Each structure stands twice: as structure tokens, then as C-alpha cells.
Image (tube, grey):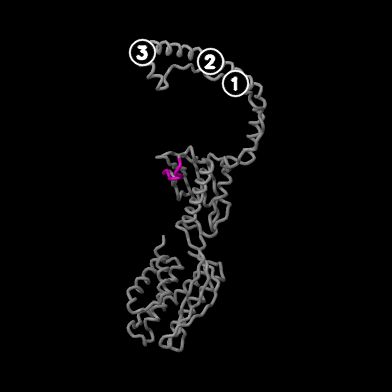
């Protein structure tokens, strides 16, 4: 069952035609939309468990950096010794490279001397005469003593399983007993190069049980998605991983709330009614039934009382639908003319959208459109109708 919270603001507007005055009462309301998988009101508690490769905090990053610095200080003497050994090897290799260079020059020079004069002149013109190229002698650079630097936290994905679990919020529920038990298993973000672009995926398994009975078991984000027009070696992978992880968590919240959450949707409902001069007692009753019971819905959280209010509100809706059968569309002077039909159709469409009865709303939309030859709409009313139509077909 849907719960509705309403506060009422009366705004009256008048339109005169054949002594008919159409007024508007605006009702601000909050519609609590039931999920695809409902949970009894007294059992709306949930728990979240996340398994992932992420177990990083700012403190752990700094602690690791300091530990690595201390190890570097401890290893410094050995690092210097190893650098000296490497330099000695480079010197030894250098002597051999010099000898090879001289031998190569001697062979090329001997061959050059055996060429004819014309061949030697041609080689000279082309800058191809033998040259002795001695490689540069290696220089020794003593390793600098380690200096501690604070780690750049932007280079890390700082998060852990508890933080990720805290990002899941199920609307209309309280954290506590695992009536709705949510288990999320996140793999690490994987990057992939394709035609010079970067793609990513993060396979995420979601299992939800309600009172121990499995209701959801899906794996999401298996398919690689476009991330950047640059290859993986030109992107900040830590930043991109954070962004992708945020995308996954945002989607999980949306998905879980669509399936299990009770989501509040705020809107303003403009209910029209005709000013009664004695000819519209029935429509006045309809207006009273609808608006009065909307107000009653706002005054209670008791489900039984809300159901009574919805039942009584339906009496007003029934009067509207019965009145439509009395409409004389082509007689503007009739008591129930096209003008009366217009505001009733608008009311029925709006009410049914608000109650999330889109099939009913579509039925009255179609009926209104079939009679638009006789029902004249102003520019503002055409805009309103277009907006209502979008709400009906919005998924």
C-alpha cells in the first residue's frame, strides 16, 4: 500500500464561460511509492555486508609510507654498496666497448683505403667516411639518502568494506536485524585498452534475502564500458577507479530502492472544481470527498485509517467518472458541457498519476484526446497535458 503525506494550499483561479467558474485547489503532497518487493511495515530492517579488495584508510597509507621510509633508511648503506658494484661493472663494460669501437674503426678505415679514388670521394661527399666513435665514460652518482615524503592520497582508492556498506541506504528501512539481508561482492575495477581508448568493468554480485528467502541474485557491471578517449597508460587509474566505484555504488542504491525501498516523491496536485450555483451538487460532493480525504491521509500514519481515506476518496473519483457519461460535448450551454469534461479529465489523470495508477491515467488521457475536437484547450492547458503524458509513459 502507498502512503501519502499531504499539506494543502488553496489557490483559486477563475475562468468564466456560460456562467461556469472553474476553481483550482493546489495540494502539496508526498507520495510514498511501494517497491517491487514489499516488506511488512513492522519488519523494515536491513543489514549490508560488502566483500571487496578495498581495505585502505588514510592512516594505513601513511603508516605504510613511513614503514617503507624506515626500511629505505635501513637499506641505504647496502644500496650505496650495490650502486658502487654496478658502477664498477659499467666501467669494466666500458673498456670492452672502447676496444670494440677501435676495432670497428680500424676495419672500416682499412676498407676505405682500398676503395678507388672516386669511391672515396663519393663516401666523403655523403659523410660516410670512417669515424672513431668512443662511447661516453660512465659517471658515478651516489644514491641520495632517503627523505620521507607524505604520500599523495589522490593516488589511492581510500575506502574499505565498512565504508562501502554504509553507502547503501534503503529508504523506509532502519539498519538493524537482517530482515532484508543485502550481500555485495565487488571485484576490483579492471581497465582495458581498445583502439587507443580505455574501457572498464567491475563485476558485482548482489544477493538479497528477505527473512532468509533469496529474492535477488544478479551480477552487474560485467560488460566493459567506455571510460576515456586516452589509453590506460595516459589516465590517472586511481581517480578513474574511484569514479567507477562511485558509479557502481550509486546504481546499487537505485536498484535496491526500486526493488525494496519505499521512496518518497514530492509533487503538487492541482484539483479543479466548478463553482456550485445549485446545478453541481454532485461535483461539489466529489471535490469534498477527494480533497477532504487527501487531508485525512496527511493526518495519520495508521495504515487502516489511510485505507479508509483512500476508499472515501474513491467515492469522489466515482462521481467524476459518472459525470463524464452526462457530458454534452457539442452543446456549450449544457450544464455538463465540454468545459466540465475538461477539468474532470484533468483531475482523473492527475489523481491516478499521483496514486501511481498509470494504466488508469492513460485510459482517461486517451478518452480526453478522443474528445479534443470538442474540448478546447488553452496554450497553458496543452502544455500541462503534454507534461502529464510524459509522466504517464515515463519508466
Q: Circles 1 and 2: CB distance less than 8 Å?
A: no
The crowding category of the residue bearing disc 3, from other C-alpha atoms within 10 Å (few below 14, some 14 to 19, many at least 20), is few
Q: Which residue is mark 3?
A: 116
In the figure, residue 355 lies in which quadrant? bottom left
- Res. 183 in view: no
- Residue at (40% x, 88% y) in the render: 18
The image shows residue 146, relative to residue 14, as above or below, that is above
Apparent side of residue 125 relative to residue 266 in the rendered image (left or right)? left
In the figure, residue 384 lies in which quadrant? bottom left
In front: mark 3 or mark 1? 3
Measured as percent of width and height from the top left, residue 371 is found at: 33, 76
Please report whichever mark, 3 or 1, sits nearer to the chain's N-terminal start. 3
Q: Secondary structure at mark 3?
A: loop
Measured as percent of width and height from the top left, residue 378 is found at: 40, 77
Disc 1/disc 2 C-alpha distance (Å): 13 Å
Measured as percent of width and height from the top left, residue 4 is found at: 52, 67
Q: Which residue is mark 1?
A: 139
Residues shaded magenta: 223-230
The image shows residue 96, relative to residue 268, as above or below, that is above
Apparent side of residue 303 relative to residue 315 in the rendered image (left or right)? right
The C terminus sits in image quarter:
bottom left
Q: Which mark is residue 93?
A: 2
* Residue 229 lies in the magenta-colored region: yes
The crowding category of the residue bearing disc 1, from other C-alpha atoms within 10 Å (few below 14, some 14 to 19, many at least 20), is few
Disc 3/disc 1 C-alpha distance (Å): 43 Å
Q: Circles 2 and 3: CB distance less than 8 Å?
A: no
Q: Secondary structure at mark 2?
A: helix
Amino acid at each position: 500500500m502507498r502512503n501519502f503525506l499531504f499539506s494543502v494550499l488553496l489557490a483559486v483561479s477563475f475562468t468564466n464561460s456560460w456562467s461556469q467558474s472553474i476553481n483550482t485547489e493546489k495540494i502539496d503532497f508526498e507520495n510514498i511509492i511501494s517497491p517491487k518487493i514489499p516488506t511488512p511495515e513492522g519488519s523494515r530492517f536491513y543489514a549490508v555486508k560488502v566483500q571487496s579488495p578495498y581495505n585502505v584508510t588514510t592512516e594505513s597509507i601513511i603508516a605504510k609510507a613511513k614503514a617503507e621510509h624506515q626500511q629505505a633508511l635501513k637499506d641505504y648503506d647496502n644500496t650505496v654498496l650495490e650502486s658502487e658494484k654496478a658502477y664498477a661493472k659499467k666501467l669494466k663494460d666500458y673498456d670492452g666497448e672502447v676496444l670494440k669501437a677501435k676495432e670497428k674503426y680500424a676495419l672500416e678505415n682499412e676498407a676505405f683505403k682500398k676503395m678507388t679514388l672516386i669511391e672515396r670521394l663519393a663516401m666523403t661527399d655523403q659523410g660516410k667516411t670512417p669515424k672513431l666513435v668512443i662511447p661516453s665514460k660512465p659517471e658515478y652518482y651516489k644514491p641520495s639518502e632517503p627523505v620521507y615524503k607524505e604520500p599523495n592520497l589522490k593516488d589511492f582508492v581510500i575506502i574499505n568494506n565498512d565504508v562501502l556498506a554504509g553507502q547503501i541506504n534503503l529508504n523506509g528501512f532502519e539498519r538493524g536485524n537482517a530482515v532484508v539481508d543485502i550481500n555485495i561482492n565487488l571485484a576490483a575495477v579492471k581497465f582495458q585498452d581498445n583502439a587507443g581508448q580505455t574501457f572498464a568493468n567491475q563485476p558485482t554480485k548482489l544477493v538479497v534475502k528477505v527473512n532468509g528467502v533469496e529474492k535477488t541474485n544478479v551480477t552487474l557491471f560485467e560488460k566493459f564500458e567506455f571510460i576515456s578517449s586516452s589509453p590506460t597508460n595516459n589516465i590517472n587509474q586511481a581517480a578513474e577507479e574511484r569514479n567507477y566505484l562511485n558509479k557502481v555504488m550509486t546504481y546499487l542504491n537505485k536498484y535496491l530502492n526500486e526493488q525494496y525501498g519505499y521512496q518518497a516523491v514530492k509533487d503538487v496536485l492541482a484539483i479543479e472544481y466548478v463553482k456550485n450555483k445549485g446545478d453541481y451538487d454532485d461535483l461539489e460532493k466529489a471535490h469534498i470527498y477527494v480533497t477532504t480525504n487527501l487531508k485525512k491521509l496527511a493526518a495519520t500514519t495508521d495504515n487502516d485509517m489511510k485505507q479508509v481515506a483512500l476508499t472515501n476518496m474513491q467515492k469522489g473519483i466515482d462521481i467524476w467518472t459518472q459525470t463524464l457519461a452526462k457530458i454534452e460535448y457539442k452543446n456549450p450551454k449544457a450544464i455538463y458541457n465540454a468545459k466540465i469534461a475538461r477539468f474532470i479529465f484533468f483531475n482523473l489523470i492527475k489523481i491516478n498519476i499521483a496514486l501511481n495508477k498509470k494504466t488508469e491515467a492513460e485510459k482517461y488521457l486517451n478518452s480526453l484526446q478522443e474528445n479534443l475536437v470538442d474540448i478546447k484547450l488553452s496554450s497553458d492547458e496543452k502544455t500541462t497535458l503534454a507534461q502529464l503524458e510524459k509522466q504517464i509513459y515515463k519508466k
